[in-house]
Amino acid sequence: MIFYIRDNSMKKVDSRFLWVGMFVLVVFFFVQSAVAQETIQVVDTAGRKVRTPQDPTRIICIGPGALRQICYLGSQGRVVGIENFEKQRPIGRPYLYANPELLNLPVIGPGGPGNINKDPDLEMVLKVRPDVIFATYMKPAKADALQMKLNIPVVVLTYGRLGIFDPQVYPSLRLAGTILKKEKRADDIIAYVEHVQADLKNRTGGLEERQKPTCYIGGVGYRGSHGIESTETQYTPLNWAGANNLASRLSDEKHHFIDKEQLLSWNPDVIFIDGIGLSLVIQDYNKNNAFYQGLKAFKTKRVYVVFPFNYYATNIGTAIAGAYAVGKILYPDVFEDIDIKKKADEIYMFLLNRPVYKFMEKDFTELGVVAPFW
């Protein structure tokens, strides 16, 4: 049996507790409501509707270039795990030079080109507790399945066509920017790239074809490193600098392995070597010197190094820096004001908030320098 003691002092205490309890409940429901409102539904680049937390504090990135886009947006501090590929092969990717602390994070999957559209390490992903997973080049069904397995939103990003700069990266940056509350930063990046393209076009757009030396790019990486026969029909730095790229006469397929006889037939005025294949070209030069001496560019020592920009998808800053270097080499008069090293660091500073040119130079020699064959 329960006895109730009636007295005025107890009524006052009960009343106070009642009001405190009501206040706690109101705050609880307000917080719950606020939390519920801090989500956003987006349509990702795979056409999927995804509901994610807005402004998440814990994220991971899987697939080519996903981590790079997050670094461009200035949200690398939210990343709680990275792919093993990023740790094992960090050269040539300026976002890792700018943010070396990322290499100390737990591994959440193998990564690398061979693991596109594959699951990360599910156990490790759950262990680092991300609020959102950003993934590039993942098919819709695969992204849906991964999201169901982990009960974590999966947002698919893209760079468009691999191997070149593709404007499809713009809506991808805006999508990630919306989720991370970095909309202005995304818009600023896009405006910057468009400004750079306009500047390059203004410098070279008025040149007649007869004023343009013929050129060729060799040593281009394609699922690994290759020699001088490896080339691109739409090599972004050459395109943006208004270069007369002889390989553009080939079929629409962007990458080609040409015969050496074709290169001898073209006999370009200027040859560029992509830094990723430079060592292989040097080896071949030492073995087959007669072939190289048959090329005008080697006779006149007009062979130059450019940094590899297509390394785990497009390193946009490196592509821009390469375009200015190509322009400076081919058209020195209209690029007279450009100091290649300073320009490269200006670009890296804008995109990554750190001047990392020196790290790229250490790995690939100077940007735009005469190649070390002589």
Image: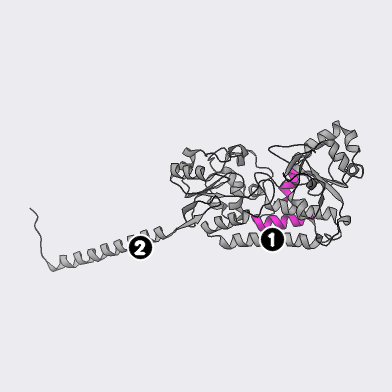
Badge 1 amino acid: Glu
Name the spot of residue 16 as percent of width and height, x first.
23, 66
Label 2 or label 1, whichever comes before in sequence order = 2
Main SS, magenta residues:
helix
The region drawn magenta spans 340-366
Q: Residue at x 62, y 56 (%)?
A: 170
Q: Which residue is mark 1?
A: 194
Colour scheme of this structure image?
Answer: one colour
Query: Distance from label 2 to label 1 (Cα)?
Result: 44 Å
Question: Which picture quadrant has residue 337?
Answer: bottom right
Name the spot of residue 2 as percent of width and height, x first.
9, 55
Q: Residue at x 78, y 40 (%)?
A: 278
Name the spot of residue 100 as percent of width and height, x first.
62, 47
Q: Is residue 226 left or right of residue 312?
A: right
Looking at the rendered structure, the secondary structure element under dot 1 is: helix
Mark on residue 30? 2
